[in-house]
Image (cartoon, helix red, strand yellow):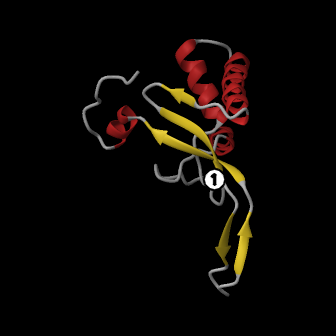
Amino acid sequence: MTRRETTLFHWELGLVAADNPETVNGPSTRTITRVDLAEAVYRSVGLSRKESALLVQAVLDEVAEALTAGDCVKLSSFGRFVVRNKPERLGRNPKTGVPVPITERRVLSFKPSAVLKARINGQVVPDEED
């Protein structure tokens, strides 16, 4: 693979800035994509790239289906995804102060586990939660 092909491949993976394909994004701006996850599965598990991509997609579909149904999704040592119902309420336009009705809706919230919080803060990881 030539340097240009490698750069374009990294650009497609989101590993380089879109405005300048020669500049690698800093750690705070990098986004992990499905392709990145599939590549990690490919390297770690040894499945083919296509099988890895299908596996990642199947897991994400299962999580999305559970959340759409209103179920809670808990990933041990990672966190918990919860769908909450928010009632209709009256808000205000901050610029004009005019009252605006905010419709009833469902929102997704994420609560990180203590293990994930500790890892993010560089602390000793406590025992895995149940």
- Furthest toward the bottom, the residue is 96
- x and y percentages locating residue 47 in the rendered image: 64, 12
**Vertical placement of residue 45 versus 65, above or below:** above
Where does the C terminus fall, quadrant-wise?
top left
Q: Image point 68% across, 14% down: which residue?
A: 48
Snapshot quadrant of residue 69: top right
Is 103 placed above or below 100 here? above
27 or 103, which is in the foreground?
Answer: 103
Percent of width and height locating residue 93? 67, 79
- In the depicted structure, whether residue 62 falls above or below residue 110: above
In-front residue for pair 27/93 = 93
- Residue 43, horizontal then vertical, whole percent: 55, 19
Residue plotted at (58% across, 38% down) = 82
Q: How many marks?
A: 1
Quadrant including the N terminus: top right
Instruction: Name the residue at 68% across, 39% down.
Output: 5
Check the image and name the residue furthest to the top: 46
Horizontal side, residue 103 vs residue 32: left or right:
right
x and y percent of residue 3 in the render?
A: 62, 40
Q: Amino acid at mark 1?
A: Pro
Other-residue count near label 1 (Cα within 10 Å), few / some / many at <14 / 14–19 / ≥20 = some
Label 1 sits on a secondary structure element that is loop
Q: Quadrant of residue 52?
A: top right
Q: Is residue 98 left or right of residue 36?
A: right
**Residue at the location (56% across, 37% down)?**
81
| Residue at mark 1 | 21
